[in-house]
Image: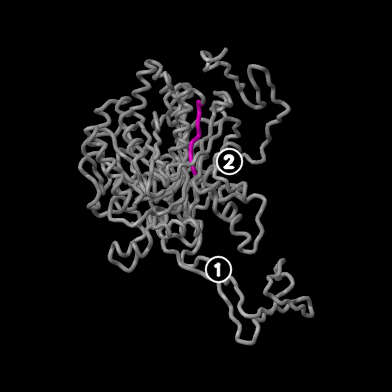
Amino acid sequence: MQALPVIVGFGGYNAAGRSSSHQAFRRMVLESLPQEEQQKTIVGLACLMALVTWDGESYRDADNNAMGPEQVVDTFGQRVLEGTLIRRLEDTLFDPTKIYGHKRVQVQAKEGEDVVFKLGRRDMPSSIPDHWDVRKLEGGSFEVHISGAGEFLVPTYSEQEAKAAGQLPSGFDPAAKYNSRFHPKGLQLALLGASDAINSVGIPWDQIAASVRPDEVGVYGTSLMGQLTQEGFGGLLQARLKGERTTSKQYALGLNSMPADFVNAYVLGSVGHTEAITGACASFLYVLQAAVRDIRNGRRRVAVVGSADAGLTPEIIEGFSNMGALGTDDNLCKLDGTDTPDWRRASRPFGENCGFTIAEGTQYIVLMDDALAMELGADIHGAVPDVFINADGVKKSISAPGAGNYVSFSKAIATAMTIVGEETVRHHSFIHAHGSSTPANRVTESEIFDRVAEAFDIHDWPVAAVKAYVGHSLSGASGDQLVSALGSFKYNILPGIKTITQVASDVRQNHVLFPMKDMDVSENPMDVAFINSKGFGGNNATAILLSPNKTEEMLSSRYGSAMKDYQQRREQTRKAAEDYANSSDHGQVDVIYRFGESMIDERGIQISCDRLHVPGYEHDVVFDKANPWEDMSR
């Protein structure tokens, strides 16, 4: 028997809010929820956005006035709605109409004259240009003469072509939630996302870690762009051109493996397995596949899997804009025939669109093998039996779609039918599309879905596209899709593509549906979601996600009467997870940050020929001495 990787916790943050306890999902389908759930969502977001605080008895506004939940909704509801999901990039990050840069200019002196200017000692370059004639003046300053022409870089400002973004909720500052000194924003997000996921489990991490060997824990993390804010590679690469000095931290903290390293060191304190993989915009599914592989083959029993990217910087946005990949303000206006871009509807998957909307965010999940989840009484939110990854082959362009997604998607459907049955896939499954909102994607991805549906005799197959709400968070995009699918399992709602008024005429719809309103599936609950992701360079991935009901049905077949004891243990876990959800909804962001705690005394490590003991860990690392190539050994 192979272990089944089950999801026992999930967390993170994006433009819709916090992922744990489905807050972000509820924001996306707000109008389809009962009044009580709507109020809970808005009040929780108001706390996250620092519009109100909770004093243990009531909510307080900035003037310390006590408020009830209804008052919070009445007073701040509109600000919560306007300050979440895709919107115009806010000036709290940077002013998109005033991007600092330099213009290279040639200064030409009048005929027979020099260009003359004066510099102080501190402003003199350490290497004097050959065409400068420098004359020392009294008082320590210098007069510079340039004959003919001189070249200078003049500070200037420009306006960003694409101003829509999937920005974190207004007022939510990750750096303010813990001692984040010198941390690039991407690493701040990684710590917050992983902490949210760990806390959502409802079982203390120390108890989980004590239940397994140290090397049976794994962290699988990624970031696509690395850390390109000022504290990471952004500052490292800009410093010399800006006349500044690099710091000792910018290089190390800029690496794209840092989210995994930070979670290992400062969230878990783990000496277990660590793995950082990038697959362009499919990166979350790349690390998820590695974790699923290791749990299925028994190498790992617990895996923390996730990604974090802070891609809202002028340089990244300009780069994607110059590729023609982003939906610019001008093109949005052309689509709508207006003079003002509709930033709220900038991302339009499978509709008439002009490019994707960049976003920031983090998503993490906690996986266990099914036996450990049963033993600990973990609450199971779903299962990931497999993830498929395939490349595109020969391409005319590195950014163009190719054949690989046909392979990954088809294999996922075939495998799911083998696991849960053909009828379940045909009538109780849905697709969470990459849905990037580019003209090329809407055609090629819809054709894959339609042709595969025809081959497997699937009809009216619903498709969701979460980027319509939160934008494209780069490495975490498929993480956004996965946690949204968990919300659909919980609430029996598939989020509609509400940013489009009609499906584009070149989108294939023979066997698939693209609902433009939230779809109530309570009469026909979903048991399987297919998480599809595509990335530059031919990085295609498709994951199978099983619902908690289908997962429990499978576990009942495996464990029989033992399920009753498990369900009793699970009640305590659910109560602890609910307590965490309530405190989080009150704005209490509990970041696990173990910097400065006592480190492992390496002198206390005990080694024998069979095992290794690390101080502070319940179990030893046991060496596997089985020879898998015994038949080939002498």
Q: Quadrant of the C terminus?
A: top right
Q: What stretch is highlighted in magenta?
A: 300-307
- Main SS of the magenta part reads strand
In this picture, is 153 found above or below 563? below
Q: Give the numbered dot on residue 102.
A: 1
Mark identifier at residue 71: none
- Do labels 2 and 1 touch, CB within 8 Å? no
Q: Can residue 416 be seen in this view?
A: yes
Q: In which quarter of the image is residue 571?
A: top left
**Amino acid type indicated by mark 2:** Phe
Q: Which residue type carries mark 1? A: His
Query: Which residue shows up at 68% across the image and 21% down it?
Result: 607
Q: Mark 2 points at which residue?
A: 262
Q: Is residue 23 visible?
A: no
Residue at 64% across, 64% down: 243
Counting every numbered tag in the picture gives: 2
Give residue 89's position: percent from left, percent from top: 44, 59
